[in-house]
Image (spheres, rainbow, N blue to C red):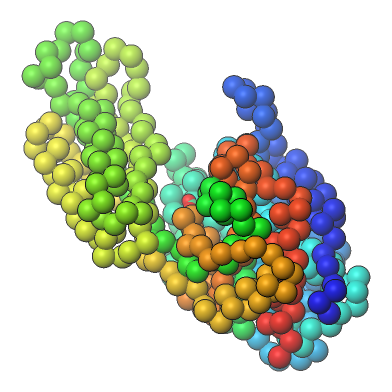
């Protein structure tokens, strides 16, 4: 069985075809990007395409109540818990073609390869794409996998609203993916996700692939800072209560905290959205809504950073005369993946004479949710251009993608054999 290989060209064609769904041209750079924001019409189109591919590969496809789509290839013993692989096909609004799609289309390529070679597995094989991994629209990430694995109640997920007040549940129905299968997933035997690294580490080290040891902690906040609107020309500085200034100071403090080393060497902090109202050149804004994204591999360092950040926010409220309402929109602890599944993955890489190393994921992934349910690990594929991601320049070579998916094939075969 070790001479079985996936078809790298077929995988690449599928990535390209899915990449045309929701494609747009970036006005500034002329590059072609992808926008399949969760539960939009483009997401619906992408879902229908991949679901059709699942069906054409002979899978029994089910859609659950949060819109996760799961295809099942029966095993010799249907009573055994399946081995599972997957990821997501929703995207940030400024995406490339690989984030999430490699894991889903890679899993599909594994099924196609097994079908062509008429290989049966002892355990059933299930492949999936999970709803709204990115979290850009409804404020919280891993929506589908968090519901499937029990971290997030279904009703809460369906009731989340986007910035225009549209409910996730209604939007799911509108694109035809509110399924009737229960969302809670029975524990698989194991879950394996192949994903692009989305960072510079593996390529810089000259690695073919990475074995992912876990995911760092993530903490997301939305801050609504209220001040007082005023004329920019007539209002003396001492009379201002400027929420824009408050957001700027908090952003500077975030940068200082992350660079200080006081919260570990790997803390990261980002204010990705700063939205002033009314947002005009000659008006001190009345309100600013901004977001904070904190990452940390150590839970204690994360907690200390949150504590110190909000002590500073209190200080800013008093100093500037603004009020800050903080809402936590997502929080997940540091996740440690299964050493057993990591060992199975590493064995396939060794067998293929690949250069690889272990790596902690800087980004969040559906695998972090699945790891609460079953032994889980991930395969990382290096990216070009310093691993840029969430950007139209995101790119991994056809050879790198094929290597990752070949390892996925053999990992699933080993895990599914007994
Ligand atoms: C997922 O893309 C994340 O924000 O880590
Ligand atoms: Mn992803
Ligand atoms: Mn992403």
List x then y, in percent, for residue 132.
Answer: 56, 54
Side of 339 relative to 17 (left or right):
left
Q: Residue at x 26, y 35 (%)?
A: 252
List x then y, in percent, for residue 10.
Answer: 85, 55
Residue 405, quarter of the rendered image: bottom right
In the image, residue 70 sits, relative to residue 83, either above or below, namely above
Position of the N terminus by quadrant: bottom right
In the image, residue 183 sits, relative to residue 362, either above or below, namely below
Q: Is residue 216 visible?
A: yes
Q: Residue at x 83, y 68 (%)?
A: 5
List x then y, in percent, for residue 195.
Answer: 62, 58
Side of 281 relative to 196 (left or right):
left
Side of 303 relative to 200 (left or right):
left
Q: Residue at x 22, y 12 (%)?
A: 232
List x then y, in percent, for residue 357.
Answer: 56, 64
Position of the C terminus by quadrant: bottom right
In the image, residue 398 sits, relative to residue 237, either above or below, namely below
């Amino acid at each position: 069985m070790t001479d079985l290989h996936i078809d790298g060209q077929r995988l690449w064609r599928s990535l390209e075809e899915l990449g045309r769904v929701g494609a747009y041209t970036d006005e500034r750079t002329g590059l072609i990007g992808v926008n399949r924001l969760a539960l939009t019409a483009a997401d619906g189109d992408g879902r229908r395409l991949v679901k059709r591919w699942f069906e054409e590969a002979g899978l029994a496809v089910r859609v659950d109540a949060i819109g996760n789509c799961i295809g099942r290839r029966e095993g010799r013993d249907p009573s055994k818990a399946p081995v599972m692989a997957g990821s997501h096909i929703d995207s940030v609004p400024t995406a490339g073609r690989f984030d999430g799609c490699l894991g889903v289309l890679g899993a599909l390529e594994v099924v196609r390869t097994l079908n062509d070679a008429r290989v049966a597995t002892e355990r059933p094989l299930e492949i999936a794409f999970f709803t709204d991994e990115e979290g850009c629209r409804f404020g919280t990430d891993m929506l589908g996998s968090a519901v499937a694995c029990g971290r997030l109640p279904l009703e809460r997920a369906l009731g989340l609203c986007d910035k225009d007040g549209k409910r996730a549940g209604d939007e799911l129905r509108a694109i035809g993916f509110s399924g009737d299968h229960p969302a809670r997933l029975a524990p698989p035997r194991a879950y394996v996700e192949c994903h692009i690294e989305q960072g510079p580490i593996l390529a810089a080290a000259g690695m073919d692939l990475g074995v992912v040891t876990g995911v760092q902690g993530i903490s997301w906040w939305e801050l609504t800072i209220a001040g007082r609107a005023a004329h920019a020309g007539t209002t003396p500085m001492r009379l201002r209560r400027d929420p824009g200034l408050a957001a700027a100071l908090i952003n500077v403090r975030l940068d200082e905290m992350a660079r200080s080393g006081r919260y570990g060497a790997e803390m990261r902090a980002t204010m990705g959205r700063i939205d002033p109202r009314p947002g005009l050149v000659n008006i001190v804004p009345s309100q600013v809504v901004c977001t904070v994204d904190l990452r940390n591999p150590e839970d204690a360092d994360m907690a200390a950073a949150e504590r110190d950040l909000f002590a500073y926010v209190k200080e800013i409220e008093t100093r500037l005369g603004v009020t800050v309402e903080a809402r936590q929109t997502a929080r997940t602890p540091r996740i440690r993946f299964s050493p057993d599944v990591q060992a199975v993955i590493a064995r396939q890489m060794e067998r293929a004479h690949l250069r690889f190393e272990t790596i902690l994921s800087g980004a969040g992934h559906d695998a972090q949710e699945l790891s609460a349910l079953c032994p889980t690990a991930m395969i990382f594929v290096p990216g070009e251009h310093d691993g840029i991601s969430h950007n139209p320049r995101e790119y991994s070579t056809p050879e790198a993608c094929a290597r990752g998916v070949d390892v996925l094939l053999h990992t699933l075969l080993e895990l599914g054999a007994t």
